[in-house]
């Protein structure tokens, strides 16, 4: 078993745009020669779900024939639910790596917090499964995934070939340009950026108010080691991500002040 | 305006158990003498929503009369949506502090990732609003909030009285014991713990399979500076939280290896 695993790693694939999105098909294509791929993904788009899990409702899961000879399941759950179901009910073991995406649209900077793509990857990392989330900075269904496939293959084969931390978690974003224009892969930190929110206030046919979330992305981080900088300069950005959210600096500051005594 | 703000801070309150939960009523009671309180909270329970935002659907918001002379609004959105709506459409400015909770049930250790309570607080911190999430380790609707109210008041008044980081974000958990048994407040780190998941597999009346998420909490972190340890020893745990998820240690390790070249 141990030997077999080394020869042909099990690659779990999920996403948050839903199992029919072009992004996940391109992810499967990019890595299927690298191992035994199994897809467990939401049956509908789940963007912006963050690290949501389904507590108060039952989940459904059905086998689907969407990826040729690659085993695939769709579930009624969130991206995080998909990872949990995959490990417990489909694979009955931990995969060697979990890949999430390829997301249609950016998950750089603060987006990592809202992203279902990255939450699925984080759930796997918490479960001691090395994990990578991939996003292409192009929201279109007709997005060109050629460069993305090339870099996905490069990064996944590199990670599979090394002895990696079992909690390894990478947030990879790919600029929306032709492969020839991409300058390479850059390790980055998460930029401090946020959405300057606004709500579009409208009146429904019954005369009642409702609100649509809108908002403009603003980057406050001018340093050159961020993912936003890298992407603006046509690099593929790779941000190593952690799930220990303790702010140790603030902890020390508050300890010094000897508060709450 | 600046002077007025110092005299009577604006305190935004939200939660993820919904606006009718006893926890939020106790939170309002605990702090209403400390400033002008405004409540904007979900109209239904939103536990486990993580950092979900509502993208594909319009949001509704209605003024409600649930907290006496305290202004209160219920929304159809997630806890994170509530913070966004509060700032943009209710207050039309940033509150001086945002409080989330009091959650019915633990949000220590890895729960910070799944918690709607903490995500609402994090959203505020991203928006440069000092913010605190409170949770009581008691799921019951009849939970005794007396000790919780005492410590909420103590912690909020301390934070309001100091010049705090505008991104200050605290995850506060309160043990489910009488006030006399609580030993004090402890600054902690997030314990590495997780849920050993399982799904309850059932058959519906049509003969089709469905799954309920279950799972047992397991603490892998035996150190004495964690929130789990503090709570087990009857301390109120306070974990300072960050939203820069960059894993700088892993970044350095990967940089040394000079990967992806």
Image (cartoon, coloured by chain):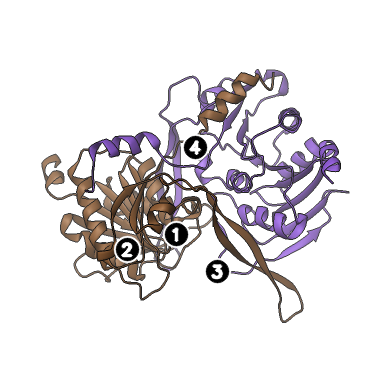
Chain colours: A purple, B brown
The answer to whether residue A209 is above or below residue A5 is below
Q: Chain of mark 3?
A: A
Quadrant assignment for the N terminus of chain B: top left
Label 2 crowd bin: few (<14), some (14–19), many (20+), radius 10 Å: many
Judged by depth in the image, the label closer to the viewer, 1 or 3, is: 3
Q: Residue at x 75, y 33 (%)?
A: A160
Badge 3 is on which residue?
A56
Q: Earlier in the sequence, mark 4 or mark 1?
A: 1
For residue B243, side relative to residue B200 (left or right)? left
Helix, strand or loop under label 3: loop
Helix, strand or loop under label 4: loop
Badge 1 is on which residue?
B77
Q: Chain of mark 2?
A: B
Helix, strand or loop under label 1: loop
Label 3 crowd bin: few (<14), some (14–19), many (20+), radius 10 Å: few
Q: Earlier in the sequence, mark 2 or mark 4?
A: 2
Task: Out of B104 and A1, give the one closest to the viewer.
Answer: A1
- Distance from disc 2 to disc 3, alpha carbons, whole Å, reads 24 Å
- Distance from disc 2 to disc 4, alpha carbons, whole Å, reads 32 Å
Are tags 4 and 3 found on a single chain?
Answer: no
Badge 4 is on which residue?
B245
Label 4 crowd bin: few (<14), some (14–19), many (20+), radius 10 Å: many
Are tags 1 and 3 found on a single chain?
Answer: no
Q: Position of residue A132 (x, y in %)?
A: 65, 38
**Residue lying farthest to the bottom in this orientation:** B205
């Amino acid at each position: 078993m141990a030997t077999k695993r080394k020869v042909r790693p099990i690659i779990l694939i999920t996403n948050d745009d839903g199992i029919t999105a072009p992004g996940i098909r391109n992810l499967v294509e990019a890595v299927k020669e690298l191992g035994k791929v199994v897809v467990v993904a939401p049956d509908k788009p789940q963007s912006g779900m963050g690290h949501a899990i389904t507590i108060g409702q039952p989940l459904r899961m059905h086998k689907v024939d969407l990826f040729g000879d690659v085993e695939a399941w769709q579930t009624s759950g969130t991206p995080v639910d998909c990872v949990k179901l995959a490990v417990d009910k489909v694979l009955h073991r931990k995969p060697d790596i979990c890949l999430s995406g390829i997301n249609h649209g950016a998950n750089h900077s603060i987006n990592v917090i809202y992203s279902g793509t990255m939450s699925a990857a984080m759930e796997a990392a918490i479960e001691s499964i090395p994990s990578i989330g991939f996003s292409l900075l192009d929201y279109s269904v007709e997005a060109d995934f050629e460069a993305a496939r090339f870099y996905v293959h490069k990064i996944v084969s590199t990670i599979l070939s090394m002895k990696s931390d079992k909690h390894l978690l990478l947030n990879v974003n790919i600029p929306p340009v032709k492969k020839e224009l991409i300058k390479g892969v850059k390790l980055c930190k998460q930029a401090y950026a946020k959405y300057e929110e606004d709500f579009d206030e409208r009146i429904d046919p019954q005369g009642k108010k409702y609100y649509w979330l809108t908002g403009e992305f603003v980057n406050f981080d001018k340093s050159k080691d961020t993912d936003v900088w890298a992407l603006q300069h046509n690099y593929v950005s790779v941000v190593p991500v952690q799930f220990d959210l303790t702010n140790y600096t603030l902890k020390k500051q508050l300890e010094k002040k000897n508060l709450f005594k």
